[in-house]
Image (spheres, rainbow, N blue to C red):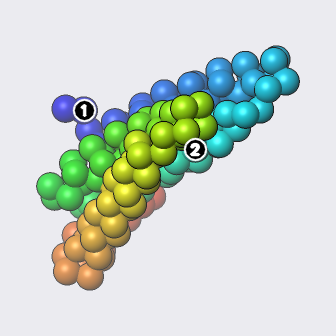
Amino acid sequence: MPKIDVAFIFLSVVCLMIGLVLGIGMGASHNFQLAPVHAHLNLLGWASLALFGLIYRAYPALTRSWLAKLHLWLSGVAALAFPAGIYVSITYEKPMLAILMSLVALAGVITFFLNLIRVFFFVPEASATESPARSLA
């Protein structure tokens, strides 16, 4: 498996590309019914995943736990499946996938939060010895 930070960034770019293609298609057709799908691909996918990747890059101690892998799986799956669920909800009026994936996205953020607490409050020497500037170089 690639490094956690790299995996998050690659997934974020995949979401950005899909979101942009969808946005261009909506603009060209003047049909904006799927704007929530586009928004979730760009915000939950591109913005959130990229930010997670940069934070893992800045604080490598965060990657030294099973929580980081769980976070990648939960957030990665949700970033792709939640917009798909919104599409199904809008198109077929079946919201169950969107509801389920919103809970998976929340579980990913909670996992990330627990990992932050683990590193910054219970492993203080790990976060104190790794400055963000040094790890980004």
Which amino acid does the dot numbered 2 rest on?
A: His
Of 106 and 32, the residue lying toward us? 32
Q: Residue 73: horizontal and vertical position, in percent?
A: 27, 44
- Seen at 19% across and 80% down, the residue is 122
Of 126 and 1, the residue lying toward us? 1
**Which label number is shown at residue 51?**
none
Report how far apart the C-alphas of labels 2 and 1 lie in the structure: 25 Å
Residue designated by label 2: 40
Q: Residue 8: horizontal and vertical position, in percent?
A: 38, 41
Residue designated by label 1: 2
Which amino acid does the dot numbered 1 rest on?
A: Pro
**Residue 53 appears anywhere in the view:** no
On the image, which quarter does residue 132 sit in?
bottom left
Q: Looking at this view, name the residue that lies furthest to the right.
A: 30
- Seen at 82% across and 17% down, the residue is 28
- Seen at 70% across and 38% down, the residue is 35
The answer to whether 110 is drawn above or below residue 6 in the figure is below
| Local secondary structure at mark 1 | loop
Left or right of residue 113, residue 18 in this image: right
Of 51 and 111, the residue lying toward us? 111
| Local secondary structure at mark 2 | helix
Q: Residue 80: horizontal and vertical position, in percent?
A: 43, 35
CB of mark 2 within 8 Å of CB of mark 1? no
Q: Quadrant of the N terminus?
A: top left
Q: Disc 2 vs disc 1: which is toward the camera? A: 2
Q: Which of marks 2 and 1 is nearer the N terminus?
A: 1
Q: Residue 67: horizontal and vertical position, in percent?
A: 20, 58
